[in-house]
């Protein structure tokens, strides 16, 4: 299966799903003019991925600095899709990364976490210092 990769823009995040490395990430800001047009291909790719998946652990790293209400709905659809797959036995982990000073991102992560029951949903706080240490 081919990699799904979309480069970040001012209003849309990087999406990089690499099934060979089992690396999945969404990072950046998300307020595209047409949310479904932007994220629709990602959903199509995920449906195909899950149809071909052999039950390997899927770990999605998300670090969204800012997102609008349309993106929030889209992310809920994404988490519903992942939760349904986990309910069918797939091992799915979401790592919701937020900066220590971004209380809004933390609260949104908490709300998303409350709405899923089958996936492992981790809230991961990071600091500017932890970014420097990672380099």
Image (tube, rainbow, N blue to C red):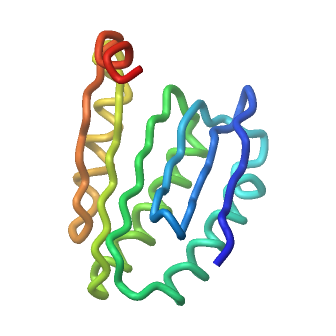
Residue 46 x/y as whole percent: 57, 72
> Which quarter of the figure is the N terminus placed in?
bottom right
Decide: is 58 above or below 15: below
74 or 99, which is in the foreground? Answer: 99
31 or 96, which is in the foreground? Answer: 96
Decide: is 105 above or below 44: above
Residue 134 x/y as whole percent: 35, 23
Decide: is 13 above or below 80: above
> Which quarter of the figure is the C terminus placed in?
top left
Q: Quadrant of residue 124?
A: top left
Q: How many marks?
A: 0
Q: Residue at x 21, y 67 (%)?
A: 117
Residue 105 x/y as whole percent: 37, 29
Left or right of 104? Residue 16 is right
Left or right of 33? Residue 80 is left
Q: Residue at x 58, y 35 (%)?
A: 68
Residue 78 x/y as whole percent: 48, 62
Q: Residue at x 53, y 27 (%)?
A: 66
Q: Residue at x 75, y 32 (%)?
A: 9
């Amino acid at each position: 299966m081919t990699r799904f990769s979309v480069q970040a823009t001012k209003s849309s995040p990087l999406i990089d799903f690499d099934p060979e490395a089992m690396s999945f990430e969404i990072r950046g800001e998300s307020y595209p003019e047409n949310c479904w047009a932007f994220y629709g291909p990602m959903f199509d790719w995920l449906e195909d991925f899950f149809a071909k998946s052999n039950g390997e652990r899927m770990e999605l790293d998300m670090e969204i600095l800012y997102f609008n209400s349309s993106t929030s709905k889209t992310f809920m659809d994404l988490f519903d899709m992942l939760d349904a797959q986990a309910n069918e036995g797939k091992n799915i982990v979401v790592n919701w990364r937020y900066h220590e000073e971004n209380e809004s991102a933390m609260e949104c992560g908490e709300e998303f976490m409350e709405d899923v029951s089958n996936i492992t949903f981790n809230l991961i706080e990071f600091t500017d210092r932890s970014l420097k240490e990672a380099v």
